[in-house]
Image: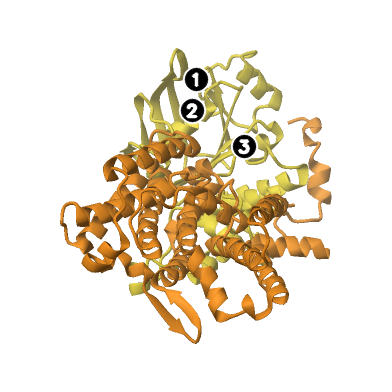
Chain colours: A orange, B yellow
Amino acid sequence: MTDTDHYESSVREKRAEKVAEFESHSKGVMSRVQHALHVTPALVPLIVLIASIVIFGLLLGSRFFSPFALTLILQQVQIVGIVAAAQSLVILTAGIDLSVGAIMVLSSVVMGQFTFRYGIPAPIAVLCGLTVGTACGFVNGWLVSVMRLPPFIVTLGSWQIFLATNYLYSANETIRAQEIEANAPILQLFGAKFEIGGAVFTVGVVFMIALIVVLGWVLRQTAWGRHVYAVGDDAEAAQLSGVNVKRTLISVYMLSGLICAFAGWALIGRIGSVSPTSGYDANIESITAVVIGGISLFGGRGSIMGSLFGALIVGVFSLGLRLLGADAQWTYFFIGVLIIAAVAVDQWIRKVSA
Amino acid sequence: MSIDQTREPILKGRNLVKRYGKVVALDHCDFDLYPGEILAVIGDNGAGKSTLIKALSGAVIPEDGEVTLEGRKVNFHSPNDARHAGIETVYQTLAMSPALSITDNMFMGREMRKPGLRGKWLRQLDRPAMEKFAREKLNDLGLMTIQNINQAVETLSGGQRQGVAVARAAAFGSKVIILDEPTAALGVKESRRVLELILDVRSRGIPIILISHNMPHVFELADRIHVHRLGRRLCVIDPKNHSMSDAVAYMTGAKVPETEFEAA
């Protein structure tokens, strides 16, 4: 080598710093907030939730700030909350599932029709409904991971297919609540109510909260959960580091389908009857809850707890504004503002690095 | 360091062939990596370096020819096969999930589970053990002063990320470590630290394949230099007996070596 090749030697000899010093520099308040949100992304929706409860509580007093009204919100959001849990899983993998509502309704119709049309024992019909939901999820997952089609397109198509199947199969026929109550009360299991000091809970509400807690634990504490985040963050990098991306994606969509089927069961409990026309807007409502809950639509970021908070925020706004006597459109107005604000906050949190 | 050519190569490729349509990326290519050495692989863009490396790390399945690891023939069908055999690759893109923590990234795809029922039935991760292991491995390579092993990788600088990726490879790569352009995205000072890291890994006895376009780095680190041209090994040169301009001349075809093992 000639001397000219040593142009780096000055750097080599005079360098002072090490590359891997991970010291934290003194930070400003905003930067500290940004870091806190980066670590705990469910913090924003939690703060918004508490603030909105406090504001409506101050405006409405005990009409709103009572165990009854607050648990009424839980009952009203239980379906969206359960579906939002399914949606969160898919969105964490940088996908989106527009077919959640259709899977939910189709599963509930299968549970109802299998019981009443074929006379299958209700518990087995429920299992069939759960299986159908999981199978729908598998179809989505297979198309997304193996056929490598974009999730938006896949579920836009499967939404129509599942919904049409639901109408064709049920022949647009509703099974009445009294009939279910008399012959197959297990279908209404999620609607069973119990009261604790004025607060009214249903099995569906308990299921929603338990589901979120369990999923939160699984996402944080198991390898599968970490893989879900890694796939959403950068699928190629995950593949190169040894994650089975296809299997992870299929499992996520199947689990999402299963959870939607449970939502279908809960839907029967909530409305009493089995109706092929119910829950048609669950897909948009679930995406709203997930986005307000701080889960990034670009995947890999957010906590499932946030989607519960997101669903509750929507519930608090709609009940609070209704009790205030405001036009229902104001609910949509504020939800729209929250969605845009949530995405703006997400973009800001992403810039935390460097 | 003098490499004893009579020793058996730890990783050997013979007659490797890979075509992409009409393009021949590997044209009966040979490859030898000896124990304990740093072998640099240089070549012009499109010479087939990446394909060669992918064939050795399982990302590409060669159509013909054979790869042997420690004298045994191996057939890698995926990067995971190669990893299980003890060959770790640090990709140019680093293959890390930016939003996940250092520990999560180090263990991605080979997580440790808690002992007993919680690990077996609930499949719960053994976070304390994983964190301890990750901290030890980073300490081993002098990547000290990491305050929070659970901070997201995206909050690290480019050099720090590279350090974590190399530490991951060194922690699990028992036989061979492949580094693809480890300094390409780094500034001069950060590059310097990564080069030291590479030498540190070599001093542990793990042979390294270094793909780089940076001639000063190649000549500083490499024990031997594999010059790749037109899909095959043109020659292997000794950096002590050749200048960088020689290497570039071989690479571009301006100069033709006399024998394949000119330096040997």
Q: Chain of mark 1?
A: B
* Quadrant assignment for the N terminus of chain A: top right
Counting from the top left corner in percent of width and height, residue A253 is at: 40, 48
At x 81%, y 49%, the residue is A13
Tell me the crowding category of disc 3: few under 14, some 14 to 19, or many 20 or more residues within 10 angstroms, Cα based.
some
Tell me the crowding category of disc 1: few under 14, some 14 to 19, or many 20 or more residues within 10 angstroms, Cα based.
many
Can residue A214 be seen?
Answer: yes
The amino acid at mark 1 is: Gly
Residue under pointer 2: B51
Which mark, by number, is residue A294? none
* Left or right position of B20 against A14: left
Residue under disc 2 on the same chain as residue under disc 3? yes
Q: Chain of mark 2?
A: B
* Left or right position of B167 against A160: right
The amino acid at mark 3 is: Glu
| Circle 1 or circle 2, nearest the eye | 2
Q: Are marks 1 and 2 in contact (CB under 8 Å)?
A: yes
Counting from the top left corner in percent of width and height, residue B245 is at: 70, 23
- The residues tagged by marks 1 and 3 sit, at their Cα atoms, a distance apart of 19 Å
Counting from the top left corner in percent of width and height, residue A320 is at: 64, 67
In terms of depth relative to the viewer, which is nearer, B56 or B9? B56
Residue under pointer 1: B231
Residue under pointer 3: B181
Q: Is residue A147 above or below residue A321?
A: above
Q: Is residue B246 above or below residue B202?
A: above
Can residue B121 be seen?
Answer: no
At x 49%, y 49%, the residue is A281
Q: Chain of mark 3?
A: B
- The residues tagged by marks 1 and 2 sit, at their Cα atoms, a distance apart of 9 Å
- The residues tagged by marks 2 and 3 sit, at their Cα atoms, a distance apart of 14 Å
